[in-house]
Amino acid sequence: MNIQTSINRAQANILEKTKKGRDLSLQISQGVQRDHFVKKQRYDIFITKMEQLQRADKREKSNLKKTIGKMQNAFVSSQQPLKDVLHYYNKAAVKGFDSALVSNTLEQIKLTMRARGNRPRVYDDYTTREFDLSWRMHLLSDHIKLGLGDEIYFNHYHMANSARQLGEIGFKDVQII
C-alpha cells in the first residue's frame, strides 16, 4: 500500500508542476511582443515567388513569339509546310485554346495551300486528303470546337476570321459546321 500511495503522490505532483509550468508559459507569452519579422519574411518569400513566375511568363512569351515566327515562315522555307505549320501550332498551344493563335494558324494554312498552287507536288507533306485526316489538324479542330462551347470565350473577330479561313481551305468537319 505504501508503494501505491507513493505512486499516487508522484502523479499528483507531476500534474501540479505541469499545470504551474503551463500557466507560467502562458503568462510569459502574453508579455512578449509578437515577432514583426515573420510578416516581412513571408512577404519576401511571396515577392521571390512572384518574380520567378514573372520570369517564367516572360520566357514563355518569348518562346511563343519565336514559334509563331517559325510558323509564319514555314510556307516559304520548309519542305513540309503544312506539317510544320501544324507542328508549330501544337507547340504553341501547349496551354490550350487561344483564339488569336487559332485564327493565325488557319491564315498560315490558307497561305500555304495557296503557295502550293492548283496541282501541288507533295512529297513528304500532307496531300489535301491527308490534311483533313491528320491528327494535327484534328487537334486544331478540337480546339475550335472547345472555343465554340459555352465554357470558353472565342473572340468574335477571331471566330469570323477562323470561319472564313476554314471555308477557304475547304476543311470538312461536320461537328464544327
Image (cartoon, rainbow, N blue to C red):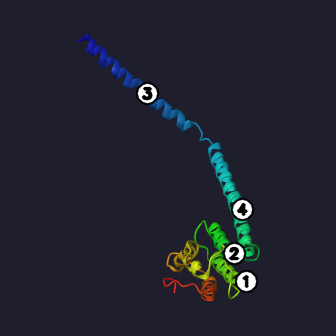
Q: Position of residue 98 (x, y in %)?
A: 61, 74
Tag of residue 81: 2
Tag of residue 58: 4
Residue closer to the observer: 139 or 153: 139
Cβ atoms under marks 1 and 2 closer than 8 Å:
yes
Q: Quadrant of residue 4?
A: top left
Residue closer to the observer: 49 or 37: 49
Q: In the shown orientation, is residue 122 left or right of residue 9?
A: right
Tell me which numbered mark, 3 or 4, is placed earlier along the sequence.
Answer: 3
Q: Quadrant of residue 5?
A: top left
Circle nearer the viewer, 4 or 2: 2
Three-letter code for the amino acid on which mark 1 is drawn = Ala
Q: Position of residue 121 (x, y in %)?
A: 69, 81
Measure the C-alpha gap from mark 1 to mark 2.
Answer: 10 Å
Residue underneath mark 1: 115
Q: Give the vertical position of 172 relative to 74 (above or below).
A: below
Tag of residue 20: 3
